[in-house]
Amino acid sequence: MSFAVMFHHFHGRLHSKSQGSISAKQFTLMLNFLKKKYNLLNANKFFEKILNKSIKKNDICLTFDDCLKCQFDIALPILKKKNISAFFFIYSSVFDKKPNYLEIFRDFRYTKFKNVDVFYKEFFKLLEHKFKNKKKSLDEKFKKNYLAKYKFYSLNDRKFRFCRDKIISKKNYEEIMIDMMKSKNYDYKKKGNKLFMTIRDLKYLKLNNHLIGLHSNSHPVDIYSLSYKKQYLDYIKNFNFLKKHLSISPKSMSHPFGRYNKNSLKVLKKLGIKIGFLSSPVKSIKSNLEIGRVDHNSFIKK
Ligand SMILES: [Zn+2]
């Protein structure tokens, strides 16, 4: 089984610790481990081997999702030192003028509470207070096996995500979170742009031979519920953004939240995407747009 390793958050310097985040030291140890155990390929080599079907069982590559500044500040210098190139999957709405809540909310829940369970407790309390019926349907509908394949999620982590993705509307969710941020004096407007890479950072990635790919424009929580046309419009926006600012035609991508359907694959083919990554491992590669990934947290103990 060849696969990719999926990275998200790093901590150190300006970046606070959050669930699953790793330090520079842990990242270095992880790379040493991966290099010893597998055939760690540069991104373009992995891409080439997938396309000409010469990929071997032991071949792996590194991928970074979500355009995060902490990746640029913490992981990139180490990649440079070790001379490894990786895939970076960028969702373009982070460059919109309005604040991008996905990362802001995450930063808020990991920096403003004693621990994340305290956050969950307050969140569910406020949910009950503001949208009593929704809290009731959450308690009735939540199934313990939701997202159970992600072993690093606690029960509360999964219940919160079930609520966010299946029970309440985006609008209601944002309303609760904004209320909470206000009550904790968290200045989300100021924080917003510090969490993401800039266009200049992306240019630097390109210059250093990293491969930059799509991750949708808006990072929808449930892309499979969108029509073909809506998915197309979202991805083409993402594509055109990268084309405009980096003068590239992206050929790679990762599915936001690892979710997709037949229409997503059709859209990606139309855009000329040759290689796509999921967010969990697969036994064998079903298609070049459905390559499995292993979360870096699976290696942390090793
Ligand atoms: Zn993502």
Image (cartoon, rainbow, N blue to C red):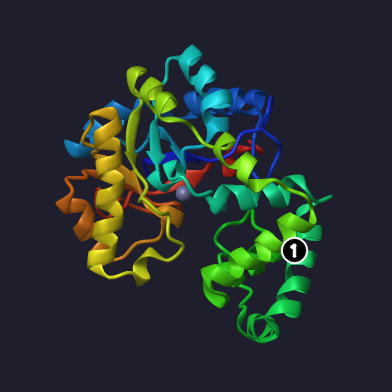
Residue shown at the point (56%, 53%) measured from the top left: 101
Left or right of 217? Residue 100 is right
| Residue 183, horizontal then vertical, whole percent | 79, 58
Q: Quadrant of residue 12?
A: top right
Residue shown at the point (46%, 62%) measured from the top left: 221
In which quadrant will I find the C terminus?
top right
Is ligand 1 within 8 Å of the beta carbon of the residue shown at mark 1? Answer: no
Left or right of 95? Residue 48 is left
| Residue 128, horizontal then vertical, whole percent | 74, 79
Q: Residues within 10 Å of mark 1 (few under 14, many from 20)?
A: some
Question: 14 above or below 295?
Answer: above
Question: 218 above or below 272?
Answer: below
Left or right of 48? Residue 59 is right
State the residue in front, 278 or 181: 181
In which quadrant will I find the N terminus?
top left
> Extreme right residue here?
114
How many numbered marks appear?
1
Q: Amino acid at mark 1?
A: Tyr
Q: Circle 1 sits on which residue?
A: 120
Question: 50 above or below 112?
Answer: above
Residue shown at the point (57%, 77%) measured from the top left: 167
Left or right of 227? Residue 175 is right
Evaluate whether residue 148 shows in this view: yes
State the residue in front, 74 or 1: 74
Residue shown at the point (74%, 56%) measured from the top left: 182
| Residue 70, horizontal then vertical, whole percent | 58, 31
Evaluate whether residue 162 shows in this view: no
Q: Secondary structure at mark 1?
A: helix
State the residue in front, 109 or 94: 94
> Extreme top residue here?
81
| Residue 189, horizontal then vertical, whole percent | 61, 45
